[in-house]
Image (cartoon, helix red, strand yellow):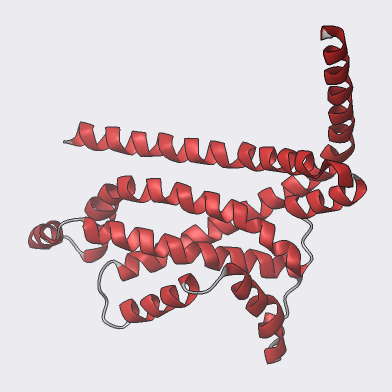
């Protein structure tokens, strides 16, 4: 009986190994596309969102309500709708600079989607710093920019980093949606592989999920490490 069980397990392992060898090259190709989409979205979305967050965190009369409307519009609509608007609707306006291909539309959509969350995180962290620190810096003759750079932002980093990890992981998973505009990323490659091996749907999705985990887990670990370093730096300064 034990030998029969071992033969059964051996045949299953051989089958799964064969499927993995057949589909993994395509999945890795899709993973590279997912990696590219996510990194571009993270970099420019964080830069744009960071600038908006700094403005919103200082209660500037005109900028604050405009940025607030921007956030409510983006965070109140699904990412898929935003992608459709950028890829299908904006090109119909007739402006040549809005005639994007699918990859550019995906980059723009992911960056805007990321910026809406980064803006709220950065502005919330800045507002969490007691107002008296602004007033004390101004009393010492610091300009607003110098106060922000030397006093406010360094203290805000520890509040910003933990939330950014969650946003970045959400962005990585959101890249699976851009397949609707013709981007062949990881999940699209998994769907194509399932057509070839319809009897191994769960296993192919497991392989795709393992690749997502291989990307998301180091991001969370890196953000956690940066958070710890920022906490240690604050403890040393105090």
154, 92: nearer the viewer: 92
Give the x, y percent position of residue 81: 61, 75
Whether 176 is drawn above or below 113: the answer is: above
Q: Residue at x 89, y 28 (%)?
A: 15
Whether 148 is drawn above or below 230: the answer is: below
| Picture quadrant of residue 136 | bottom left
Give the x, y percent position of residue 8: 86, 19
Q: Residue at x 84, y 30 (%)?
A: 16
In the image, is 51 to the left or to the right of 127?
right
Q: Residue at x 37, y 65 (%)?
A: 53
> Can residue 85 be seen in this snapshot?
yes
> Can residue 48 be seen in this snapshot?
no
Give the x, y percent position of residue 225: 42, 34
| Picture quadrant of residue 237 | top left
| Quadrant in the picture for the N terminus | top right
In the image, is 227 to the left or to the right of 206?
left
| Picture quadrant of residue 200 | top right
34, 213: nearer the viewer: 213
Whether 216 is drawn above or below 141: the answer is: above
| Quadrant in the picture for the C terminus | top left
Question: How many marks can you see?
Answer: 0
Whether 213 is drawn above or below 82: the answer is: above
In the image, is 89 to the left or to the right of 48?
right
In the image, is 144 to the left or to the right of 209?
left
Q: Residue furthest front?
A: 1
76, 2: nearer the viewer: 2
Give the x, y percent position of residue 66: 38, 81
Q: Residue furthest right?
A: 196
């Amino acid at each position: 009986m034990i030998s029969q069980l071992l033969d059964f397990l051996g045949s299953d392992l051989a089958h799964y190994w064969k499927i993995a060898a057949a589909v993994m090259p395509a999945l890795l190709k899709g993973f590279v596309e997912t990696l590219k989409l996510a990194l571009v979205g993270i970099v420019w979305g964080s830069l744009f969102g960071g600038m908006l967050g700094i403005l919103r965190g200082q209660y500037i009369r005109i900028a604050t309500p405009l940025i607030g409307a921007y956030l409510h519009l983006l965070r109140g609509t699904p990412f898929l709708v935003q992608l459709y608007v950028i890829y299908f609707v904006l090109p119909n306006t007739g402006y040549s600079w809005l005639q994007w291909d699918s990859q550019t539309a995906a980059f723009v959509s992911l960056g805007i989607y990321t910026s809406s969350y980064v803006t709220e995180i950065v502005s919330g962290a800045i507002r969490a710093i007691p107002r008296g620190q602004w007033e004390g810096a101004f009393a010492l003759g610091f300009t607003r920019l110098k106060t922000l750079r030397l006093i406010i932002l360094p203290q805000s980093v520890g509040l910003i980093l933990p939330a950014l990890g969650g946003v970045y992981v959400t962005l990585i998973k959101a890249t699976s949606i851009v397949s609707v505009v013709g981007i062949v990323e990881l999940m699209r490659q998994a769907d194509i592989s399932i057509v070839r091996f319809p009897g191994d749907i769960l296993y192919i999705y497991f392989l795709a999920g393992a690749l997502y985990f291989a990307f998301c887990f180091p991001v969370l670990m890196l953000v956690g490490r940066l958070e710890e370093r920022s906490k240690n730096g604050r403890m040393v300064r105090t």
